Image (tube, grey):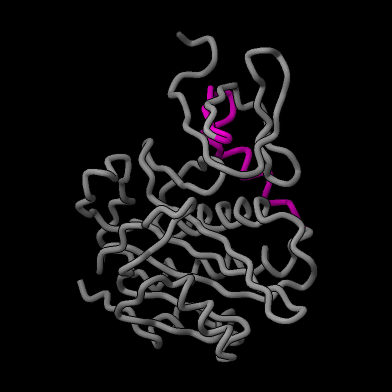
Amino acid sequence: MNDILTEQSVRTALGSCGRALCVRVLPVCDSTNAEARRLLLAGEGDAALVTAERQTAGRGRLGRSFHSPAGTGVYLSLLFPLAGPLASSVSVTCAASVAVMRAIRLIVGKQVQIKWVNDLLLEGRKVCGILTEAVGLGEQTHLIVGVGINLRPAVFPPELSGAGSLNDGSTPRSLLIAAVVRELLPLLRHPEDHSWLTDYRAYSCVLGHRVRWSREGEIFEGVAESIDGEGGLTVRTPAGGTVVLRTGEISVRTLPQGAD
């Protein structure tokens, strides 16, 4: 299958929604988020889409790397100016998770689940990560939403034993890239609209399960009960109180509370 990414193939797939975007398609880059930041700071793109065949230093949350081999994944960053102040970086990341979930369902035909706050899972394995960053330039704030999707089967290094793929060998990557952009743009244009929360809650693989997280070196556990209006995760502790997680990362028990 000939699935080499080109600017023309991506622009064709984008159609009218890509007219206002600066589009960069690279054979290789360190990180599409880093390249989007460079475009902004160089004055070459106010709203831009950057995608690459592979990344040499793809980044995830908490400083982790994102395995980005050529030909098997979709690696993109969407740069967009915020119309107002950034209310919550967590809510933007949650909204982006819903946008990518919808794009995968539409183009690949598979329903993935959302692991708070920014991972998408298929059959319990991570197939997508999202990294959202804010960049201030004068009085204007821009968002960079980075998305990495494991579309094709791939060999992952031992340290990524929990990774998987959508196992799709035929979908053109340009179609999936365009679908992600089409789903993302309305959410970025209207950050005050939190209608995405319905899908975020409905396709969560966290709610009702015991979760573990760390804070300042101490480990905590509780049961994930709900997701609030900004994407924060409400957890009930063993003592009967509740905490709302807005940053960090959780691990999830496979059994719901009381099942064992």
Using residue 143 as the reference point, say whether residue 171 is left or right of it: left
- In this rendering, is residue 248 above or below 167? above
- In this rendering, is residue 206 above or below 115? above
Q: Residue at x 36, y 40 (%)?
A: 125
Quarter in which the C terminus is drawn? top left
**Depth check: 213 or 153 in front?**
213
Magenta residues? Answer: 193-216
Q: Position of residue 165 (x, y in %)?
A: 31, 50
Q: Position of residue 138 (x, y in %)?
A: 73, 81
Q: Position of residue 22 (x, y in %)?
A: 53, 86
Q: Position of residue 258 (x, y in %)?
A: 53, 9
- Please tell me whether residue 226 belongs to the stretch shown in magenta: no
Q: Residue at x 55, y 52 (%)?
A: 97
Using residue 189 as the reference point, say whether residue 47 is left or right of it: left
Using residue 150 as the reference point, say whether residue 43 is left or right of it: right
Q: Residue at x 40, y 88 (%)?
A: 8
Quarter in which the N terminus is drawn? bottom left
Q: Residue at x 43, y 72 (%)?
A: 32
